[in-house]
Image (cartoon, rainbow, N blue to C red):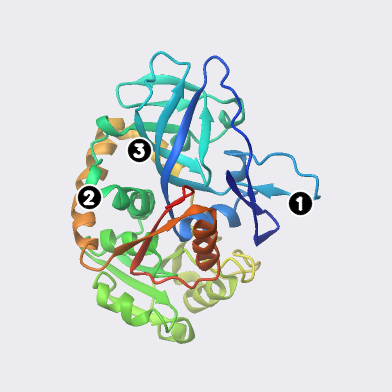
């Protein structure tokens, strides 16, 4: 069973109940046990064509003329069938998955911590998204805290890379303005930036979420979208997680040449105007692609060095979020679709992390 989305009309969804195909030599079947749904998944859908997110889990052919797609998610799966000697049935893995009951992979490039799906259609994609980690060998895995890992860790890793890019490109110390400040990627970035000496973090959010964002304590200032004229003076950098061109234009016009860097990360305001308006004052916005910075730092620091830095930061962050975050669970295709639609419409409580399964309760 798969949940598929109309790639041109993201609120149009269908449930496809397809029979499992027999495995071919070199394949393994993963049973998708549970996964997270966050605003990050909406970003995957919004930028699905531009960033090729639809290519990870292609939807089957359709006879209705609709261009269907499968939105990627992060979660946990169990190996329930394997033709690969190195991969035993019963192994639990963490990685990139479709909103489905199962996923057939072609495991290869094994090491002591996991494997890579070598399927031909995934070969051109970023390596960070093709790797599956053995839970028993994962330094951040805690069976009692699986929800934290699937809901927060992919976002926190992105936050870590945002913080790192800003430092790496010489934007710090300085003012950093972050849109969609109630989004968990924004919160993670603000948490890390606020711990840097000389960083001044300004969060932009809706009036509905302003009090929540202020109470977090990781933003030095919080402004609503109708108060952008109150932004502090420059120089500054801008991290756009909303993907709203009207907000981007207002920030660029406020700072003009005092805006030193502009980064587009997400599209939580997916139904607004396009994210990159033309003829902006200041720097041209750059699309942020976390795997590029991951590859850079892996080369410079080594995989173990990068992992040590992120694991150390993650432990403190995970404990911090326990003070304000709780998890809600959605079961079955109908429950998952409801959660997806709520996220798409922006009707979710930022204090909630959504854990989903296509399996019925």
**Residue 266 visible in this rendered orientation of the protein:** no
Spot occupied by residue 261 in the image (x, y as percentages of width and height) = 45, 61
Lateral position of residue 334 relative to residue 279, left or right: left
Residue 135 position within the rendered picture, expressed as x and y whole percent measured from the top left:
30, 34
Q: Which numbered disc covers residue 266?
A: none
Residue in the picture at 35% in, 27% down: 90
Image quadrant containing the N terminus = top right
* Residue ranking furthest to the front: 361
For marks 1 and 2, give the CA distance: 43 Å
Look at mark 1 in the image and give the residue it sits on: 66
Disc nearer the start of the sequence (1/2): 1
Foreground of the two, 225 or 36: 36
Mark 2 and mark 3 residues within 8 Å of each other at the beta carbon: no
Depth check, mark 1 against mark 2: the one in front is: 1
**What's the mark number on residue 297?**
3
Q: Please, is residue 18 above or below residue 230 in the view?
A: above
Q: Position of residue 202 (x, y in %)?
A: 35, 73
- Label 1 residue SS: loop
The residue positioned 33% from the left and 60% from the top of the image is 189
Instruction: Tell me the element at label 2.
Output: helix
Disc on res. 313: 2
Of badges 2 and 3, the one in the foreground is 2
- Confirm whether residue 335 shows in the render: yes
Q: Residues within 10 Å of mark 2 (few under 14, many from 20)?
A: some
> Tag 3 or tag 1, which sits nearer the N-term?
1
| Residue at image location 74% in from the left, 40% down from the top | 61
Rounded to the nearest angstrom, the CA distance separating label 2 from label 3 is: 16 Å
């Amino acid at each position: 069973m798969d949940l598929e989305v109309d790639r041109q009309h993201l609120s149009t969804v269908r449930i496809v109940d397809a029979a499992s195909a027999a495995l071919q030599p070199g394949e393994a079947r993963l049973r998708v046990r549970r996964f997270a749904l966050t605003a990050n998944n909406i970003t995957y859908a919004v930028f699905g064509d531009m960033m090729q997110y639809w290519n990870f889990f292609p939807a089957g052919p359709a006879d209705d003329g609709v261009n269907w797609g499968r939105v990627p998610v992060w979660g946990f799966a169990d190996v329930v069938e394997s033709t690969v000697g190195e991969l035993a049935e019963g192994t639990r893995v963490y990685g990139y998955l479709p909103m489905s009951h199962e996923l057939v992979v072609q495991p290869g490039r094994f090491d002591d911590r996991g494997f890579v799906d070598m399927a031909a259609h995934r070969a051109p994609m970023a390596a960070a998204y093709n790797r599956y980690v053995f839970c028993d060998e994962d330094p951040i895995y805690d069976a009692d805290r699986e929800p934290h890992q699937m809901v927060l860790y992919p976002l926190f890793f992105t936050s870590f890379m945002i913080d790192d890019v800003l430092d790496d490109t010489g934007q710090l110390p300085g003012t950093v303005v972050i849109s969609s400040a109630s989004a968990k990627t924004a919160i993670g970035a603000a948490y890390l930036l606020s711990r840097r000496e000389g960083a001044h973090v300004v969060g932009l959010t809706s009036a509905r979420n302003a009090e929540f964002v202020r109470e977090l304590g990781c933003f030095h200032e919080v402004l609503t979208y109708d108060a952008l004229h109150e932004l502090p003076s420059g120089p500054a950098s801008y991290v756009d997680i909303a993907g709203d061109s009207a907000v981007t234009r207002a920030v660029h016009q406020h700072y003009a040449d005092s805006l030193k860097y502009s980064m587009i990360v997400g599209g939580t305001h997916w139904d607004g105007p396009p994210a990159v308006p033309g003829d902006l004052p200041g720097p041209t916005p750059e699309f942020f692609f976390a795997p590029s910075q991951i590859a850079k730092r892996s080369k410079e620091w080594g995989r173990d060095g990068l992992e040590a830095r992120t694991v150390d930061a993650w432990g403190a962050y995970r404990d911090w979020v326990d003070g304000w975050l709780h998890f809600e669970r959605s079961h079955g295709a109908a429950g998952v679709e409801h959660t997806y639609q709520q996220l798409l419409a922006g009707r979710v409580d930022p204090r909630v992390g959504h854990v989903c399964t296509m399996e019925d309760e």
